[in-house]
Amino acid sequence: MKKKMLKTGIKHRELRWDKLDNTANLFPVIVSETVSNVFRISVTLKEDIDEELLQKALNKVLPYFDVFKSRMKKGIFWYYFETNRKPAPKVMPENTYPCLYINPYTNNEYQFRVTYFEKRINLEVFHVLTDGNGAFTFLKEITYQYLRFKYPELMENSNDILQSETSLDREDSYLKNYKKSAKKTYKTEKAVIIKGEKLPVNHFGIIHGYIDLPQIKAVAKKYGVTINQYLLGVFVWSVYREYLGGMPSENPISACVPVNLRPYFNSDTTKNFFAVVSAVFKPTKDNYTFEEVLEEVAKSLSNQINKENLEKIFSYNVSNEKNWVVRAIPLFVKNIAMKFVYKTSARANTTTITNLGIVNVVDEYRDYIDKFHTVLSMSKGQNIKGSVCTFNDVLVFTFSSAIRENFVQKAFFRKLVEDGINVSIESNGVYYE
């Protein structure tokens, strides 16, 4: 059915509604002007962006993606999605900091925006719609369509609007895969919170580190860990050395790590489908070595990232949603309870670091694409966050921060260089203002 739709197009869109997935239920409750729950993924091409063609590409691709072609409504018991029949949001030149709050009333009621800067196309998404994997699917199709408009010779090899392997699945994979007997498998302990001089409201310091993939792969192998474990170990080490001064702490350094669940449960959904684990290190003595910190972080992650544990994590959350008592509670009461739970759990993590993995593109478009980036917005108690994606053997580690001090970021990249990894740095200049 999907493949046929890709070829025949969409002649009429019926008004339809859909429930928010389990993870998405939290985001409308905690969203605000300063806690936007918006993330950015972007693609940089090799020539400046043509605004008119980018708008045409968005207009053409959007109708195929029900997850994005929607608006959020407030019901008596839950928020829900409804088909948005308004025109696509207007593509705009980038003129603000990344990941700011998306006001649906000034955005044709859509929960995403598309902007551009020079050669870069930015897709910013309110997390209520999808996660990074779902967003990348949408961004890549917009990019392919843009390139076909820009370079008509690409049209000759393309009979369909979308790539045949592109998923339009809108399954709630949480509901499909949860187990009824699940119990809570995690606890919340107040973590180290990185504090400092706050940047002005809605200002973010952005630092991109461009890292040679074969080099970091070799270093991680030398330490006997995965690339992700190594990166998290370096971050925790940097906080321990630079923020705690290598001293003991009553609170752990805890990095929240979203895990894409699709490979574990054979899912192609374009909705949210991830679970969160934490890389934890509690310094109880002076002067840990890097190897000691890395070992603790790697062990913490290894014990959590397996199908059985991930299933328990999201199944517990889904079981709460399906509880008939909870379902019968009016939304305004649920909101109060969810805000309280969020504020409590927000203290349990020092940061969030997400790795979206290798970005694969269709070969015929590869020569037109230079690089990809991801950027996370701030959340309560987390003033520094990290995000990772890899393209053409270059891993990009991006720090976003709401505080002026950047000694943790400097220590992070310095450690990579000490380990023999080539790193080049790019910043948005906030730290030099």
Image (spheres, rainbow, N blue to C red):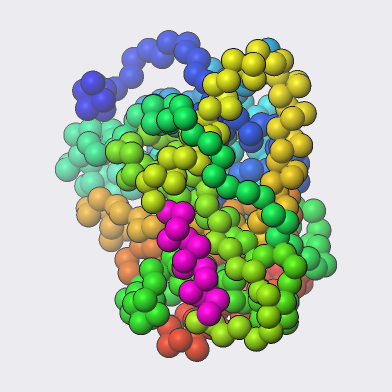
Magenta stretch secondary structure, dominant: helix
**Foreground of the two, 247 or 334:** 247
Q: Residue 95: in sight, yes or no? A: no
> Where does residue 377 sit, x and y in percent of width and height?
64, 52
The quarter in which the C terminus is drawn is bottom right
The residue shown at (71%, 15%) is 330
Q: Is residue 10 left or right of residue 42?
A: left
**Foreground of the two, 15 or 75:** 75
The quarter in which the N terminus is drawn is top left
The residue shown at (60%, 68%) is 281
> Where does residue 364 sit, x and y in percent of width and height?
22, 53
Q: Quarter-wise, where is residue 338 in the image?
A: top right
The residue shown at (66%, 74%) is 283
The residue shown at (61%, 44%) is 38
> Where does residue 189 sit, x and y in percent of width and height?
69, 54
**Foreground of the two, 201 or 20:** 20
Q: Residue 339: in sight, yes or no? A: yes
Residue 57 lies, with reference to residue 276, above or below; the image says above
Q: Quarter-wise, where is residue 64 in the image?
A: top left
Q: Which residues are magenta?
A: 292-305
**Foreground of the two, 198 or 64:** 198
> Where does residue 326 sit, x and y in percent of width and height?
64, 20
Q: Is residue 219 left or right of residue 314?
A: left
Q: Quarter-wise, where is residue 420 in the image?
A: bottom left
Magenta run includes residue 31: no
